[in-house]
Image: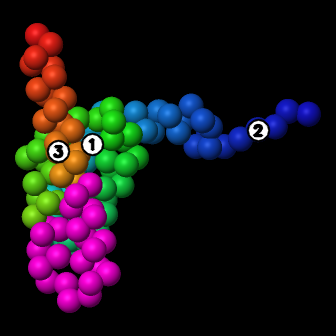
Amino acid sequence: MTSYTHSFELSEVNDACALLISENAELLIDYIYQNTDREPYNNPVVRVGLVIKTLLRSGNDTVTVNAATIEPATKDLTELIAASSNPVERKIYTDELKFLRRCTLLDDLISLNTVAAL
């Protein structure tokens, strides 16, 4: 008996989705910050969460994201940390900020290695 699966559940579709996100991560992040005047993008927590999910879903070791693209999310996190009086929440935001900075540093290192290889 043959077993059938929904197309969106196929492993090759999941792989293609990760590739699509990876190839368009900067566009997706830019879109989030170009639409901060409307829901759900008017909420800084949602914006940051979407940026992080985009980076994680894209396989951060293969995607290169310009530091300028990450800067609005870094600014959001810095403001969230400053506004929070809850130490657990501040720790979470601080960890997320470290993650974004690592992504930016990784991008800088990739750029340096590319230039050095030329």
Earlier in the chain: of badge 2 and badge 1, it is 2
Say left or right for 58 vs 95: right
| Helix, strand or loop for the magenta stretch, by majority | helix
Residue range in magenta is 76-99
Amino acid type, callout 3: Thr
Q: Secondary structure at mark 1?
A: helix
Whether residue 89 can be seen here = yes
Amino acid type, callout 2: Tyr
The residue identified by callout 1 is: 25
Say left or right for 115 vs 22: left
Q: CA distance from mark 2 to mark 3?
A: 42 Å
Q: CA distance from mark 2 to mark 1?
A: 31 Å
Q: Is residue 96 magenta?
A: yes
* Residue 54 rendering spot, x and y as whole percentages: 33, 50
- The reply to whether dot 1 and dot 3 touch (C-beta < 8 Å) is no
On-image quarter of the N terminus: top right
- Mark 2 neighbour class, 10 Å CA radius: few under 14, some 14 to 19, many 20 or more: few
* Residue 22 rendering spot, x and y as whole percentages: 33, 37
The residue identified by callout 3 is: 104
On-image quarter of the C terminus: top left
Earlier in the chain: of badge 2 and badge 3, it is 2
Amino acid type, callout 1: Ala
Task: Please tell me whether residue 43 is drawn above or below residue 70 in the rendered image.
Answer: below
The residue identified by callout 2 is: 4
Which residue is found at the position 58% from the left and 43% from the top?
Answer: 8
Q: Is residue 75 magenta?
A: no
Q: CA distance from mark 1 to mark 3?
A: 13 Å
* Residue 12 rendering spot, x and y as whole percentages: 56, 31
- Mark 3 neighbour class, 10 Å CA radius: few under 14, some 14 to 19, many 20 or more: many
